[in-house]
Amino acid sequence: MRSRRNNPLSIEVVNPIAVEIVTEEVLRGILVGRLRDRVGGMESLVDKCRSLIEPRAVYAFTRVVSIEGDEVTLESGHTLKSIVLGDVLTRGQEVALYVVTIGSRLEEEASRLGVSNVFEAFVLEKVGDYALSKASVQLRRLVENRLGVPVSGFGPGTGSGRLFGIEQQRVLFSILNPLKNIGVRLTSSCLMVPRKSVSGVFAATLNEYVACKYCPREGCERRSRPFAGEYVPIRFRNAD
Ligand code: SF4
């Protein structure tokens, strides 16, 4: 990680992010198979979740000043190391760095419930995933409105971590200071606390990038696209 602080960034905080929890939508994702019989009382549980989530985000726009292989240097002087970012970004391009969270209260309650009521703890976890996903979409829209084009999202450690390693969290955190700004810290193994947090880079790309396409993990219930095999860099694709 290089850290030549050439150009101080304007760090923005969104607190709170407006997230609408639509009960029917949440329950549709949870109550599948035999769980459909357990709909009674679920509305009040979802209401409880609403009171426990605290969606917020910190983000900053910056430009790419140079790309050498998998090293992408930003105008802030920081360098992100990533095979996929080095491949799809271009010099001079504006990108957004971000961390989004729903806070720790919901997951603390899920842990507490896990001792006495595993099903309710499961529901809280699922509502947390749903709320975090919605908060991320809200931030993505904000970035797209500012850039005027659709963006792809790149998260350190997603998939196998080969294309954008989880250790690159340290670069994002050194830029955005999420602990001070939205209460998210990084562990020594680069995991975020609270767990219900996501981080990454939003950037316009020629073709939409979706990490799931290059992630071989089997049985992932959050998979959004089928596995398409190893990532092939653009220069090799064009050579075909
Ligand atoms: S398949 Fe699952 S683990 Fe792999 S990138 Fe997609 S959501 Fe993440």
Image (spheres, helix red, strand yellow):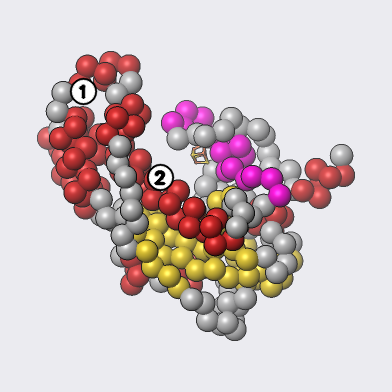
Q: Is residue 178 visible?
A: no
- Amino acid under disc 1: Val
Label 1 SS: loop
Q: Residue at x 61, y 37 (%)?
A: 213
Would residue 198 be counted in the magenta stretch?
A: no
Per the rendering, the mark at residue 39 is 1
Query: Which quadrant is home to the N terminus?
Result: bottom right
Q: Which residues are magenta?
A: 206-221
Q: Residue at x 67, y 65 (%)?
A: 93
Q: As drawn, is 133 to the left or to the right of 1?
A: left
Per the rendering, the mark at residue 133 is 2
Question: In terms of sequence position, does the residue under pointer 2 or pointer 1 come before the other?
Answer: 1
On screen, 19 above or below 76?
Answer: above
Separation (CA) of disc 2 from disc 1: 23 Å
Is disc 1's CB within 8 Å of ligand 1? no
Q: Residue 216 appears at what percent x and percent y?
A: 58, 35
Which of 90 and 195 lies nearest the eye of the viewer?
90
Q: Residue 174 appears at what percent x and percent y?
A: 47, 72
Which of 49 and 211 lies nearest the eye of the viewer?
49
Cβ–Cβ below 8 Å for labels 2 and 1? no
Label 2 SS: helix
From the image, give the main secondary structure of the stretch colored magenta.
loop
Q: Residue 107 appears at what percent x and percent y?
A: 25, 47
Q: How many residues crowd around disc 2 within 10 Å: few (fewer than 14), some, or many (20 or more)?
A: some
